[in-house]
Amino acid sequence: MKYSHFEALAIGVGGVTVLATVLLALQPQPDWTELAAQLLLLPVLVGAVHWGRKGGLVGALGATLTYLILRMPNIVLTGLEAEVLQLVLIRTVTYGFVGIVGGELCGRIKYFFAKLEDSLSIDEHSQVYNQRFMAQLLGNSLGEATRYGTVFSVALIEMSPTLTADLRPARVRSLVRAAADYIRNDVRLVDDVGRLDDGRFVLVFPHTPRDGARIATARVRNGVRDVLGAKDDSVAARVMGSAEDRDDIQALLDAIRPQPEPEPRVERRVPETA
């Protein structure tokens, strides 16, 4: 299952569930604040499913703040009673669980789906897509751009070899995993993250022009640098847009695409003459 399909399914099922609970709670004298609080679960869910843990956290904080504002007149009039405090705590925990825990799970589910479909599609050290899968993805994206004019962007994140030159293999794997986890959590869940055989990370931003991808890539580059404790020039980034740099993207695809194995040479034996 593609993650975009899972995203639509999760938002659809979650939205129907939330709306159903709101309708069931309608009474002759409903608590409109609690009904609004229930509806606030929707943006939290969307943030978690579309943006992952960070998006879910932002959604949870926004929903909690909105709920407190809605409750403020009641708190001012009657004070912070035990019942109101309990409602605030329940809502805060619910928003946090849906946003943070749900976002983290969604971030892992995407690559789990890929591993279920093809166990050879995930890079062993980083647990994001490997070079073979990214070559297939880039080929499909270029094909869609040619046929339908869709726009996408590609970013390359390269870490200087000096960062890991004197480190033990276990430490190198730990740094690679830390960088991969940061990148995966910092981009949208619809964006694809992979690691090439030469150690570079490649990001594919669907339906994103080059200027938009540059902003996201600059944020990712700075974050990776901070995670690794590296100097500014130790982490480099390059962004290519399908509309402006199609030849460069094609060159990248040609470089990482698996080469067909040569056909075995069959020697023909000349029949001996009598």
Image: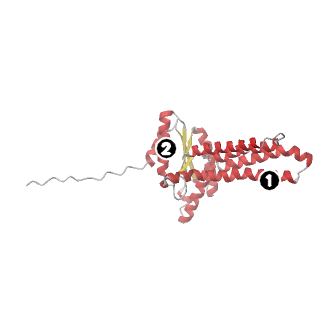
Q: Position of residue 225 (x, y in %)?
A: 62, 54
Dot 2 amino acid type? Leu
Q: Is residue 236 left or right of residue 73?
A: left
228 up-or-down from 12: above or below: below
User: Which of 179/22 is in front?
Assistant: 22
Q: Where, by quadrant of the figure, is residue 2 drawn?
A: top right
Rendered image: mark on residue 169: none
At a point 44% along the width and 47% down the height, the residue shown is 255
Rendered image: mark on residue 138: 2
The colour mode here is secondary structure
User: Which of 189/208 is in front?
Assistant: 189
Q: Position of residue 27 (x, y in %)?
A: 81, 41
Q: Is residue 81 left or right of residue 22?
A: right
Q: Position of residue 85 (x, y in %)?
A: 84, 52
Q: Where, by quadrant of the figure, is residue 229 drawn?
A: bottom right
- Residue denoted by label 1: 89
At a point 61% along the width and 44% down the height, the residue shown is 9
SS of the residue at dot 2?
Answer: helix
64 up-or-down from 151: above or below: below
Dot 1 amino acid type? Leu
230 up-or-down from 78: above or below: below
Q: Tell me if mark 2 has few (under 14), some (14-19) or many (20+) residues whose alpha carbon lies within 10 angstroms of its own.
A: many
Q: From this viewpoint, is residue 100 visible? A: yes
Q: Nearer the viewer, mark 2 or mark 1?
A: 1
Q: Is residue 199 left or right of residue 264?
A: right
Q: Is residue 78 left or right of residue 157?
A: right
SS of the residue at dot 1?
Answer: helix
Of the image marks 2 and 1, the number of the one nearer the N terminus = 1
Task: Kindly report the distance in space between the C-alpha atoms of the residues bearing marks 2 and 1.
Answer: 46 Å
User: Which of 229/25 is in front?
Assistant: 25
